[in-house]
């Protein structure tokens, strides 16, 4: 069989790469424990909603254990979730409630600062330029050695998650360099969700299996988001968090070094 013309060879390669990633067959595999986290000094988490950081509790714990200062940017106000428990919100605004729950989670995870520009929940894509500016400013101000955000598909396809990923990518394309850890669904969830990563280079997949202590911390943070119980329970397939994190104890990250991330974001900002 003759090889396909160049114009369709690249899309075919990208498609095959996406398929291999989906089944966990692509990329160099490494354990987060084998990475030199202690040399980082600072890391910055950039997500869309208060509670998104739950996806990376294991990694955030390892970073703090290694003495890395971790700050958080939550881009939206989280105030559009129709499933938020009004009884928990009480007399506060929807945003105030979610902010308070985030601060509580940050105390449990020993995270430093929260930057809350409060773009409208559900409409981050319409504010991508301004969100990119916020992320760029924080990169310049804090010089994190590592940025943690969603994978290109936003882990579960939520448009705000995808927009948060794009804001980071754009900010890194024009701002200072940093390594990039993109939260990805581990198999079997990736089979259905994919990760949306395309590159001429295979990525490193950094995996982490939660220790019993990290599992308990993750469950406590989960329980602390009382106003979000209905949404979070849907994400754990209706299971209590301790059971879910015991059944699925791994976190997966597409991990690019600062040099790899620099090349990647500039190739497709
Ligand atoms: Zn979210």
Image (cartoon, grey):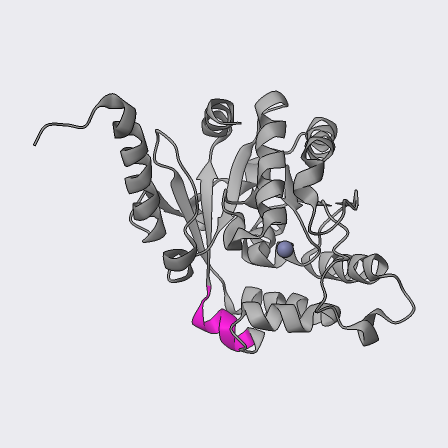
Q: Is residue 145 above or below residue 35?
A: above
- Relative side of 34 to 112, left or right: left
Residue 140: image x %, image y %?
A: 71, 26
Residue 142, quarter of picture? top right
Residue 234: image x %, image y %?
A: 57, 71
Q: Ligand 1 shows up in which quadrant of the image?
A: bottom right
- Mark count: 0
Q: In which quadrant of the rendered image does the N terminus lie?
A: top left
Q: Is residue 103 above or below residue 266?
A: below
Region rendered in magenta: 242-249
- Relative side of 189 to 41, left or right: left
Q: Nearer the viewer, residue 89 or 115?
A: 89
* Magenta region includes residue 245: yes
* Magenta region includes residue 75: no
Q: Residue at x 43, y 55 (%)?
A: 193
Residue 135: image x %, image y %?
A: 69, 34
- Relative side of 152 to 148, left or right: left
Q: Residue at x 62, y 23 (%)?
A: 176
Q: Nearer the viewer, residue 121 or 168?
A: 121
- Which residue appears farthest toward the left when viewing the image? 1
Is any atom of residue 27 visible in this view? no
Residue 24: image x %, image y %?
A: 33, 52
Q: Is residue 177 above or below residue 125?
A: above
Q: Main secondary structure of the magenta part?
A: helix
- Which residue appears farthest toward the right when viewing the image? 91
């Amino acid at each position: 069989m003759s090889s396909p013309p160049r114009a369709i060879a690249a899309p075919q390669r990208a498609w095959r790469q996406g398929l291999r990633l989906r089944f966990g067959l692509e990329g160099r595999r490494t354990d987060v424990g084998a990475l030199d986290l202690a040399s980082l000094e600072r890391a910055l988490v950039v997500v869309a909603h208060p509670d998104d950081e739950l996806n990376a509790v294991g990694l955030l714990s390892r970073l703090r254990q290694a003495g890395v200062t971790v700050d958080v940017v939550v881009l939206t106000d989280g105030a559009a979730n129709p499933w938020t428990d009004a009884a928990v919100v009480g007399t506060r605004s929807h945003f105030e409630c979610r902010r308070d729950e985030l601060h509580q989670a940050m105390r449990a995870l020993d995270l430093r600062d929260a930057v809350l520009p409060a773009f409208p929940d559900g409409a981050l894509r319409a504010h991508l330029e301004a969100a990119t500016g916020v992320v760029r400013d924080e990169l310049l101000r804090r010089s994190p050695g590592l940025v943690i955000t969603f994978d290109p598909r936003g882990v579960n396809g939520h448009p705000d998650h995808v927009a948060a990923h794009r804001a980071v990518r754009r900010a890194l394309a024009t701002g200072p360099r940093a390594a990039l850890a993109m939260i990805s669904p581990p198999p079997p969830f990736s089979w259905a969700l994919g990760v949306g990563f395309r590159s001429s280079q295979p990525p490193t997949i950094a995996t982490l299996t939660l220790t019993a202590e990290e599992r308990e911390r993750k469950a406590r943070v989960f329980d602390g988001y009382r106003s979000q119980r209905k949404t979070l329970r849907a994400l754990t397939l209706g299971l209590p968090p301790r059971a879910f994190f015991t059944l699925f104890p791994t976190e997966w990250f597409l991990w690019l070094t600062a040099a790899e991330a620099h090349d990647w974001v500039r190739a497709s900002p």
